[in-house]
Image (cartoon, helix red, strand yellow):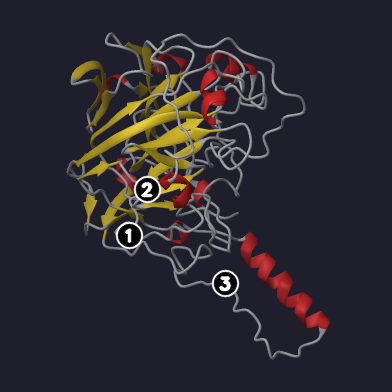
Amino acid sequence: MRTSLDSCVPAPACNSQDYKLSTLDGITPNTQYLGDASKSKWVSSGTPKVFQDQVLLTLSEDGESSSGTLLATTSYVWYGKVSAQMKSSRGVGVVSAFILLSDVKDEIDFEFVGADLQNAQSNFYYQGVTDYNNEVNLPITKGSTFDTYHTYEVDWKPDQITWSVDGKIMRTLEKSKTFNTTTNTYHYPQTPARVQLSLWPAGSSKNGKGTIDWAGGLVNWDSPDVQANGYYYALFKDVNVECYDPPSGANVTGSKAYIYTSLAGTNASIAETNDKTVLKSLLGSGTDRDKDYPKPAKSSDTSSASGTKASSAASAAATSEVATVPGLTGAGPGTNGQRPDSGNGGSSGGSGSGSGSGSGSGSGSGSTDTSSAAGSAATGFVQGDNSNSTPNVAPQKGERVLQRSMFAILVAFLGMLVL
């Protein structure tokens, strides 16, 4: 059981780089990533594919991408300039996103609702606290979010954030204007965050009414894109990260990792250190990085059946303790991946499942199949017809129930602990 901040795994520090998204090289399934950011650039969940030097995030009705697809950088950003060159998906109920998300749920967003291809939604959250006044639509005047590649940029500084589209600043947020007199704190994103790219079914029947309405309605699984390819898709060409120096007065004793020194979740609670970030297995933690799975019994072992059962039980128990860090903390609009409403998405407290998308299988098998990506062109992928129209919503196919939701965001800071 994790009971202290020391149990949390240090986060790999920012690394300025240009992520060319033309192959699946450097993308590791979240069931295999163990914290070495030098070997993996992205952690994945769902089914990313490749088509003509572009990475596709996919969303299908069934299978591995039935909850969508998510990529998260392995390195964190503690202030910097981050841009993504992308095309959103389209269709009611379907949402594409390019965001920065921290482990305490500080968040800076570009979101693209498939029912509205002429606007990019900008948003921010402080520790997952919902404030509907934070969202601002940014109009797209050239083409649409679906049929035209645009470059979306977040310039995140300790005193202000700007959102830009194709080099033009569209919105500026000053930290000085985010002071909350109730909590006596600035409700301003200020903790190290990962870049996340995602495509997810906000219009799932499992979501609350407010989320579904925000997404334009229920997902239409008979849309032209699904009929042509078997899935919805968003396209990404490039993500660029330029790291800034830590804020003035920061606790800096190294350059390799970020750690939390208190539960406050503010600038002052972050230290930049040289702590190690790599685990031996997904059972590891900040205080026991070498923890591994039980060794399998030797073939010559003649132990009793009861002993075998005990060993199996111990192995199952160990697997159930799989760490939620490193891995994916999810993506979405700030509160468990949903808009708060009278449905099941109304908790801004952000209580999440300890077995969220950051958890992994002891088998080490991943959900990303590079062979399927390499063969995506041969499977007959068809890009859209460059129409800005959004297909009408169709009834959901009977008895369809989403069995998982990788976009549930974990508990703010305690989501990093195994309770």
Which residue is at 66% across, 83% downward?
Answer: 297
User: Gap in Å between the C-alphas at discs 3 and 2?
Assistant: 28 Å
Q: Secondary structure at mark 3?
A: loop
The vertical placement of 11 against 247, above or below, is below
Q: Amino acid at mark 3?
A: Tyr
Numbered badge on residue 24 = 2
Q: Are marks 3 and 1 in contact (CB under 8 Å)?
A: no
The vertical placement of 362 against 200, above or below, is below
Q: Number of labelled discs?
A: 3
Query: Measured from the top left, where is residue 194 in percent x and y?
Result: 36, 42
In screen coordinates, is 402 left or right of 14? right
Numbered badge on residue 39 = 1
User: Gap in Å between the C-alphas at discs 3 and 1?
Assistant: 22 Å
Nearest the viewer among 116 and 177 is 116
Whichever of labels 3 and 2 marks the residue nearer the N terminus, that label is 2
Which residue is at 67% across, 27% downward?
Answer: 206
Query: How many residues crowd around disc 2 within 10 Å: few (fewer than 14), some, or many (20 or more)?
Result: many
In screen coordinates, is 318 left or right of 8? right
Q: Quadrant of the N terminus?
A: bottom right
Query: Measured from the top left, where is residue 140 in percent x and y?
Result: 31, 11
Q: Nearer the viewer, mark 2 or mark 1?
A: 2
